Image: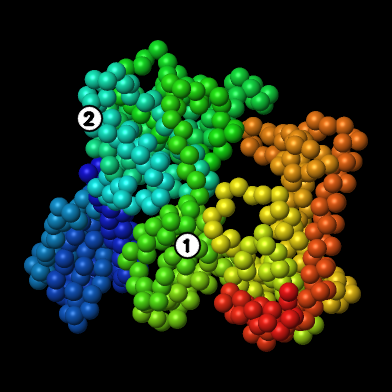
Amino acid sequence: MRDVLKNILFALVIFMVLVSLFSGANTFFDKENVISLSDLALKAKSGEIKTALISGDKIELTLSDESKVFAYKEASGSLLESLKNLGVNDNDIKKINIQVKTEGGLAYFLINILPIVLPFLLIILFFYFMFRQAKGGQMQAFNFGASKAKLFDANKEKITFKNVAGAEEAKEELKEVVEFLKSPGKFLSMGAKIPRGVILIGSPGTGKTLLARAVAGEANVPFFHISGSEFVEMFVGVGASRVRDLFNNAKKHSPSIVFIDEIDAVGRHRGAGMGGGHDEREQTLNQILVEMDGFERDTNVIVIAATNRPDILDPALLRPGRFDRRVIIDEPDIKNREEILKIHSEGKPLSADVVLRKIAERTPGFSGADLANLMNEGAIAAARKNQKEITQTELTESIEKVMMGPARRSKVYSAKEKEIVAFHEAGHALVAASLSNADAVHKISIVSRGRAGGYTLKLPTEEINFYSKNKFIDELATLLGGYAAEKTVFGDVTTGPHSDLKTASDLARRIVTEYGMSEKMGPMTFGEREKLVFLGKEMGENRNYSESVATKIDEEVSSFIDKAYKTAMKIVKEKRNALNKIASVLIEKETIEQTEFEELMKSMRASGSVA
């Protein structure tokens, strides 16, 4: 209502200004034939004037020939007096039809009063808007420390645990929290206390925020949600003030739930030596600690937080009494991936040939967000082809698009470069197919995707939770298969194996320094990662070993790489015919799918090309 009145007042002022300018413009632009009072007297004596219309000091004269002229009388006198003073007798005056035009209320106001009132009105409006802005800024200053948490509207988009596939253990933990809020008597009768907080820990995209939204949909209690970064401001103390305001609001609506997303933004480890005790994040964290478990402990407010970096959180935040429960949300396994795909396929017309189980088999390591993106990319691809349904082909292509980026078919290779890429990928596939612990080859392609010139898609036949040393050794040999193939066929190497060599070197070093799989170094780990707490970045490695041990580590890493390279070279040389065959098919077709590759290897085994 206030804004409406302001707009009406503003429009009225604009209207007045325009009318005033318009009336002045008419006077300015009209070309008037003005005569003097002496001429007026002469015309009156000669009987040339038919009518005289007096409007203020202005006189509009209509002559005998119907033409019009104008004259201006004295401001203090009347027209009759002026004519008599100029020698016009009464008979001549009687011949003139004299009329007086009186001004209306609006016209009188616009012409006489508005020019006086308008400047004062504009000054008043100027001061009004200036004080209004100052008042708004003052109120903004008072609200600066207010919480920015939003109250979740469950009716707007209701999400329940039925909309969350997988993460069964996490859902059970959160169901208990919801049940505690709905019927606390059942738990209190057993002497159980309401949990103070639940922290959701998982990799990005695993569904932490989605679970929190499901809790909001299930619990019929107020649900406040805020991001950890919204507490932090430039001024020290603002974050702590917002925390107090948030918990005060939550207590007023208790029982209630407070959800803090990305809590690591304010909950990082204190005492890092940066910013001192007056650092804004530390002040905010201190206030969160007090609110969650301070002297006041009889509040029915449950805090749910989410993070993917639990290692950098302050220990005081994670202790029982604050976050009593840690809920780990892992990457979904094959069964859960299939369930997630079913949820995200709702509302999408799937073809009869779509088998979501096969899509789930080809997506190990995919998070829930990745699977949602996969289904969306499949729908976009089908719509781009003007199809009525989404087929298995679009979904399979979407897997590779999500993993490596879109196909770059416009990138043209020369015949020589295409041959190099074909032998390189054939080397990876051949070595993988020849080793018992290597993952199965699902697809080989020399179509560029992302920054890769080609790719060999290898996926495990079943879910792997623990990797063995033999598995790593075969993986190293597979990574070096492309390098070995280029060296064998062309007698030279290109920059193509760059990423393979980097991955192999990193894996070999982890085998020695982190996994304790080196016979020479023994079951030990070497090196400690240093982290800068406030940035959450690994800044380097703190060596907890001597230079002589570092030399042995380098030698052992080189030994693993050397053995893997020799294994790859042996396979490529012994099965050169098979390598040539795979490369020739790739050059011709550009892509080999799993079934075609298996048939190709089977036929070559039958012919003796492959052992």
Residue placed at 45% from the left, 78% from the top? 384
Looking at the rendering, which quadrant does residue 493 occupy?
A: bottom right
Can residue 395 be seen at all in this image of the molecule?
yes
- The residue singled out by tag 1 in the image is 360
Three-letter residue code for mark 2: Ser
| Secondary structure found at label 1 | helix
Residue 536 in the image: state x and y as whole percent: 63, 37
Percent x, y of residue 149: 38, 36
Residue at x 30% of width, y 24% of height: 300
Question: Badge 2: few (under 14), some or many (20 or more) residues near its Cα, within 10 Å?
Answer: few
Q: Alpha carbon of mark 2 to alpha carbon of mark 1: how far?
A: 39 Å
- Helix, strand, or loop for circle 2? loop
- Numbered badge on residue 183: 2
Q: Amino acid at mark 1?
A: Ala
Q: Is residue 251 above or below residue 474?
A: above
Q: Residue 202 location in percent, x, y?
A: 51, 43
270 relative to 223 in the view: left or right: right
What residue is shown at x 28% (from left), y 53% (from top)?
11
Please determine whether, in this image, residue 335 is positioned above or below residue 245: below
Q: Position of residue 517 (x, y in %)?
A: 74, 44
105 lies above or below 328: below
Q: Quadrant of the N terminus?
A: top left
Horizontal arrangement in the rendering, residue 525 relative to residue 554 (left or right): left
- Check whether the beta carbons of the residues at disc 2 and disc 1 lie within 8 A of each other: no
Seen from the viewer's position, the closer of residues 572 and 137 is 572
The reply to whether residue 143 is visible in this rendering is no
